[in-house]
Image: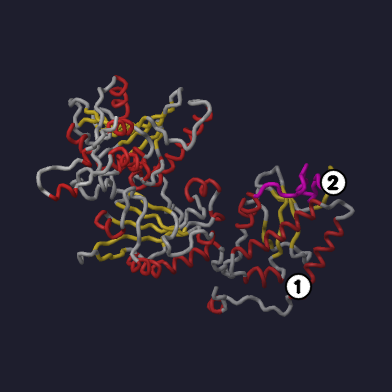
């Protein structure tokens, strides 16, 4: 029952007028109101992990369970320093005492409580500091607080199941955080509590939590990051592998080392240093599908700032107002920004440690500092890097695109005779159509579909052929005549990888159309078309000069 006259509204009669100014918050309303501070499941779990790392834990084991009756539980076990009874009382106090180590990932003394209550109605801690110490346990039950309308925790006996769970997830000492009555772990209810559909939803949450931890704590999970303690995190028994969003194995950090330190003056006049690095990721054309999916994960939402506080990611994606964040042309650009706890006030770090605010002066400074890298990321996305004439023209982008594109309309090859230069195909003209065509086997995959060659003596700019990386499964390719004026004068002057790829794809598409719509009767007609197009191009380009080389070529390059 609610007290008819709660302590917060009772007047003292001591004669001290200041007592009348006391206006304590209503326990029930406030503790429920603090559930809505903006956490989701993933940021809430990360806040609990922060406490484990602050307690020097080397292992954090998380388990999410769905009971057959639909009840949901989340357990966090760590092998950190642990707490005694007094430590437990302080840890569960809203606005706990400030940590002695200010660099700790814990900050306001609210994270554990507000994070936990954002997901569940009851949360507790079981802990001990040494293997021979008794387990201590305390909990908050929001329904109990509502019933008594007091800031009153609940103290319950430790069950045999809890002792077993502590030993399994923590070991001999450490801390076990228990979330129960998890009314917000899923976003909706299910007709069959604990059924297949609800379990699938829980499994999805588990998967996304692993991905979230892999990013947020990537510097703690990566043993090579020696500046931060090495931590192992598991979720439902599966170890979390770190994901470094900057993919340093293939990306380029383009800021000079001398410019990566950013001095920031605080209100008291002291100066602290943040660290900034500008990473440009490789273009998707320069990676395999697996590399992009697993390591780079290039997307619109992935571009922008990745803010680290004490090595822990507190914000990722977007440019914090410096530039637009929805343009794919900058999706290769990621900014690594690191600062320590001493800059918390300067950046207005919030309770969830999930966002910062940049001072206008710092915004301007960062925009100027990163402007060159920002432009370079756009150029690399558009494939506008210079194509050196002396080094030849690269056709690898087109080969990759053709190889990875499904449902292309091409002839189906039934058999080939490499020596005779003939093949039997099924195409739009029918089955078992005989065609005359160059046949190549065991071709370098980088030249599988588009090749520039010296041995086309007919004068054609292009000719279809059948090609295979092995001795079977031949498919349509196109051979380009390196001696044709179009190749020497146009291809060689392309300043953009996109331009080269576009011409390659056009000529491959013409070759594919020819092979898919020809037979012995039509083949001479297709050859006449190629001859006429190639001849006209030679005439049109007769007065076009050959490309310049060396310094002259550099001077003539388009400023774009």
**Residue 150: mark in rendering:** none
Instruction: Say which element carries label 2.
Output: strand
Q: Residues within 10 Å of mark 2 (few under 14, many from 20)?
A: some
What residue does disc 1 label? Answer: 538
What residue is rendered at 33% in x and 50% in y?
A: 353
Q: Is residue 530 above or below residue 135?
A: below
Q: Quadrant of residue 451?
A: bottom right
Q: Is residue 206 visible?
A: no
Left or right, 390 with reference to 86: right
Q: Is 554 or 46 nearer to us in this picture?
A: 46
> Residue 441 location in percent, x, y?
69, 48
Q: Position of residue 388 (x, y in %)?
A: 56, 69
Q: Which residue reaches farthest top?
A: 160
- How busy is the neighbourhood of tag 1: few (under 14 within 10 Å), some, or many (20 plus)? some
Between 291 and 489, the one nearer to me in the picture: 291
Would residue 519 be visible to someone looking at this image?
Answer: yes
Q: Tell me the SS state at disc 1.
A: helix
For the C terminus, give its image quadrant: bottom right
Compare residues 204 and 184 and report the one nearer the observer. 184
CA–CA distance in space, label 1 to label 2: 33 Å
Q: Are marks 1 and 2 in contact (CB under 8 Å)?
A: no
| In the image: residue 540, left or right of residue 244 | right
**Which image quadrant for residue 514?**
bottom right
Magenta residues span 405-427
Residue 4: image location, x then y, percent: 26, 34
* Dot placed on the residue nearer the N-terminal end, 1 or 2: 2
Residue assigned mark 2: 433
Q: Is residue 410 magenta?
A: yes
* Quarter assignment of residue 53: top left
């Amino acid at each position: 029952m609610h007290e008819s006259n709660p302590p917060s509204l009772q007047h003292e009669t001591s004669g001290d007028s200041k007592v009348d100014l006391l206006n304590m918050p209503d326990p029930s309303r406030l503790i429920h109101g603090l559930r809505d501070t903006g956490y989701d499941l993933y940021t809430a779990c990360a806040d609990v992990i922060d406490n484990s790392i602050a307690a020097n834990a080397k292992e954090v084991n998380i388990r999410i369970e769905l009971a057959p009756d639909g009840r949901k539980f989340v357990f966090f076990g760590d092998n950190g320093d642990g707490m005694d009874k007094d430590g437990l009382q302080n840890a569960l106090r809203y606005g706990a005492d400030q940590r002695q180590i200010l660099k700790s990932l814990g900050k306001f003394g609210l994270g554990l409580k507000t994070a936990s209550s954002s997901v569940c109605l009851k949360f507790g801690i079981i802990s001990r500091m040494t293997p021979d110490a008794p387990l201590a346990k305390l909990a908050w039950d929001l329904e109990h607080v509502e019933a008594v309308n007091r800031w009153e925790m609940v103290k319950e006996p430790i069950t045999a199941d809890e002792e077993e769970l502590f030993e399994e997830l923590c070991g001999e000492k450490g801390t076990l955080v228990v979330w129960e009555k998890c009314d917000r772990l899923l976003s909706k209810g299910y007709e069959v509590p604990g059924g297949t559909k609800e379990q699938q939803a829980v499994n999805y949450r588990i998967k996304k939590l692993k991905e979230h931890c892999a990013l947020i704590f990537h510097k703690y999970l990566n043993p090579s990051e020696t500046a931060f303690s090495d931590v192992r995190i598991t979720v439902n028994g599966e170890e979390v592998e770190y994901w470094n969003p900057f993919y340093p194995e293939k990306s380029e950090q383009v800021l000079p080392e001398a410019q990566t330190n950013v001095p920031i003056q605080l209100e008291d006049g002291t100066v602290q240093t943040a660290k900034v690095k500008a990473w440009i990721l490789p273009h998707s054309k320069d990676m395999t599908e697996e590399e992009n999916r697993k390591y780079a994960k290039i997307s619109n939402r992935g571009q922008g700032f990745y803010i680290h506080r004490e090595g822990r990611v507190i914000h990722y994606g977007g440019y914090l107002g410096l530039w637009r964040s929805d343009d794919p042309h900058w999706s290769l650009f990621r900014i690594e920004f690191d600062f320590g706890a001493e800059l918390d006030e300067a950046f207005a770090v919030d309770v969830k440690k999930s966002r910062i605010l940049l001072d206008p002066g710092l915004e301007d400074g960062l925009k100027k500092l990163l402007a060159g890298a920002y432009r370079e990321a756009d150029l690399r996305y558009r494939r506008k890097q210079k194509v050196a004439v002396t080094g030849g023209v690269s056709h690898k982008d087109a080969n990759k695109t053709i190889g990875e594109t499904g449902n292309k309309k091409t002839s189906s090859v039934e058999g080939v005779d490499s020596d005779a230069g003939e093949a039997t195909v099924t195409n739009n003209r029918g089955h078992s159509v005989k065609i005359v065509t160059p046949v190549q086997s065991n071709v370098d995959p980088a030249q599988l579909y588009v090749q520039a060659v010296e041995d086309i003596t007919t004068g054609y700019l292009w000719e279809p052929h059948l090609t295979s990386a092995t001795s079977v499964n031949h498919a349509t390719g196109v051979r380009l005549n390196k001696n044709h004026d179009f190749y020497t004068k146009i291809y060689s002057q392309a300043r953009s990888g996109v331009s080269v790829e576009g011409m390659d794809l056009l000529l491959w598409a013409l070759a594919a159309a020819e092979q898919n719509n020809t037979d012995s009767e039509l083949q001479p007609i297709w050859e006449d078309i190629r001859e006429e197009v190639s001849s006209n191009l030679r005439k049109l380009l007769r007065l076009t000069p050959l490309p310049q080389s060396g310094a002259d070529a550099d001077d003539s390059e388009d400023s774009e």
